[in-house]
């Protein structure tokens, strides 16, 4: 039987099938928008966390917990440049850089603020996904070599010091009692941070400039940029052992260093949102399942109405598979029509949501979350829709295939 005939039979009872198709559309919309919201939150948070640093491992000093060759327990470990150079030799480490964190008074003309600063190397910007304007730059190798008095401002600091932050580059500011040239201002980005402050509130100077001015004996922490996340646990053990040996501590004492692992946090966030998507998918599927019951009722009514016709077809040689497939296809057609309407409505709602302006501190921190009807979400919706349509038609179709032709011909 042709699709046109199937659709004609499907719409024999127009009111009932239209209401059923609308129920399918609503069920499809429910599951699609819920999964899209979950996917949008997952993608947004993953991007936000990635802005804090990709493949970044921050190493900070800990305390000894074991007595070892005269070194007592509860001794504070103090990281040095020797530790940085040692970590660079680990195979999975792409780069390791010393970081000094400190706070200082900053002033430009009559405006002043107390800000947090990091003394860093040029690769800090790449690791932390820091973007600057077209004519701006981050700390570079020449700055480090020449121990230049240059500074890159965080977006929040630039707002506090300058009426127009876009004009900050090229200006001279006072840092403590020293003059520094502003060479860049960080562009605004959403981020979840694990350090003392988000990047928007930090400011950066060359690491060698800080060492020239203060002659520090110890580093605040070490930023490690690694290659393979699958080797991260092994890399952490190697770092812990190296630092323990450098400071005459027990190589098996895991407490001598602390690790801040953004990749691990990102994985946990992904798992959380994946679980949330499963929950939202189940809730949406229940709505679609109820709509599937409506299709089944229409199919049972269609079988009952066409009993004599089914008997005639079977008497003329139609197989049970032909009868079975006819009503399954009829059910799937109803599911496809309703599902298509539901997906179109979902796309329209997502478009409208993206037009809504959202502002506030939370939005500035995590970015604007928007539903995402990704390929994976669409695939899940289509699979669930197909299963509902199949089983909604299968049981009425099985009843039709079991009809006795002789009894059907006498059916009133």
Image (cartoon, rainbow, N blue to C red):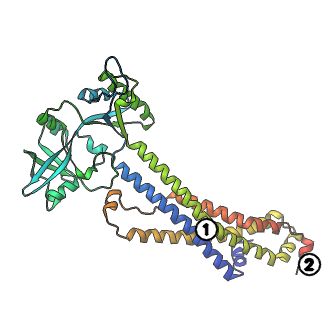
- Residue at image position (66%, 64%) is 388
Can you give x and y, in whole percent of width and height, for residue 193 in the image? 33, 49
Q: How many marks?
A: 2
Q: Are dots 1 and 2 in contact, CB under 8 Å?
A: no
Can you give x and y, in whole percent of width and height, for residue 336 in the image? 62, 68
Can you give x and y, in whole percent of width and height, for residue 255 in the image? 37, 31
Q: Taking 174 as reference, is 384 above or below it? A: below
Q: Residue 248: which numbered mark, if any? A: none
Q: Which residue is mark 1?
A: 287
Q: Taking 341 as reference, is 225 above or below it? A: above
Q: For this rendering, which residue is in front, 193 or 344?
A: 193
Q: Is residue 62 left or right of residue 80?
A: right
Q: Quadrant of the C terminus?
A: bottom right
* SS under mark 1: helix
Q: Is residue 224 left or right of residue 376?
A: left
Give residue 383's quadrant in the image: bottom right
* SS under mark 2: loop
Give residue 90's quadrant in the image: top left
- Residue at image position (61%, 68%) is 287
Which dot, 1 or 2, sits closer to the camera?
1
Q: For this rendering, which residue is in front, 152 or 72?
A: 72
Q: For this rendering, which residue is in front, 269 or 318?
A: 269
Can you give x and y, in whole percent of width and height, for residue 206 in the image? 18, 40
Give residue 45's quadrant in the image: bottom left
- Residue at image position (33%, 30%) is 63
Q: Taking 298 as reference, is 80 above or below it? A: above
- Between the C-alphas of marks 1 and 2, the distance is 40 Å
Task: Report crowding for label 2: few under 14, some 14 to 19, many 20 or more residues within 10 A (C-alpha).
Answer: few
Q: Which residue is mark 2?
A: 410
Task: Report crowding for label 1: few under 14, some 14 to 19, many 20 or more residues within 10 A (C-alpha).
Answer: some
Give the mark nearest the N terminus, 1 or 2: 1
């Amino acid at each position: 039987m042709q699709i046109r005939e199937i659709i004609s039979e499907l719409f024999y009872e127009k009111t009932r099938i239209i209401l059923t198709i609308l129920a399918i559309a609503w069920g499809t919309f429910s599951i699609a928008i819920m999964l899209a919201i979950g996917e949008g939150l997952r993608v947004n948070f993953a991007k936000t966390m990635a802005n804090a640093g990709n493949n970044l491992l921050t190493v900070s000093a800990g305390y000894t917990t074991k007595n070892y060759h005269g070194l007592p327990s509860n001794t504070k470990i103090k990281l040095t440049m020797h530790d940085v150079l040692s970590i660079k030799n680990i195979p999975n480490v792409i780069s390791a850089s010393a970081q000094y964190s400190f706070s200082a008074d900053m002033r430009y003309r009559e405006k002043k603020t107390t800000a947090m600063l990091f003394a860093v190397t040029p690769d800090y910007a790449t690791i932390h996904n820091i973007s600057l304007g077209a004519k701006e730059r981050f700390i570079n190798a020449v700055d480090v070599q020449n121990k230049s008095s240059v500074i890159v401002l965080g977006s929040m600091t630039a707002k506090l010091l300058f009426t127009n932050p876009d004009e900050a580059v090229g200006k001279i500011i006072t840092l403590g009692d020293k003059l520094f040239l502003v060479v860049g201002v960080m562009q605004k980005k959403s981020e979840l941070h694990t350090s003392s402050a988000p990047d928007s509130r930090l400011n950066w100077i060359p690491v060698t400039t800080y060492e020239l001015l203060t002659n520090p004996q110890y580093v605040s922490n070490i930023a490690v940029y690694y290659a393979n996340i699958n080797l991260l646990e092994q890399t952490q053990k190697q770092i812990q052992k190296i630092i323990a040996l450098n400071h005459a501590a027990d190589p098996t004492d895991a407490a001598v260093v602390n690790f801040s692992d953004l990749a691990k946090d990102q994985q946990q966030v992904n798992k959380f949102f994946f679980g949330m998507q499963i929950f939202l998918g189940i809730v949406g599927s229940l709505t679609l399942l109820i709509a599937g019951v409506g299709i089944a009722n229409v199919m049972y009514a269609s079988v009952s109405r066409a009993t004599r016709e089914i008997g005639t077809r079977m008497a003329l040689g139609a197989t049970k598979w032909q009868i079975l497939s006819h009503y399954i296809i009829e059910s799937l057609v109803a599911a496809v029509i309703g599902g298509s309407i539901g997906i179109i409505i979902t796309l329209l709602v997502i478009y409208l949501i993206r037009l809504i302006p959202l502002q506030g501190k939370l939005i500035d921190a995590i970015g604007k979350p928007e539903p995402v009807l990704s390929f994976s979400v669409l695939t899940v919706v289509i699979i669930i829709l197909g299963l509902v349509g199949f089983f909604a038609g299968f049981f009425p179709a099985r009843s039709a295939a079991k009809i006795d032709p002789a009894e059907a011909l006498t059916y009133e």
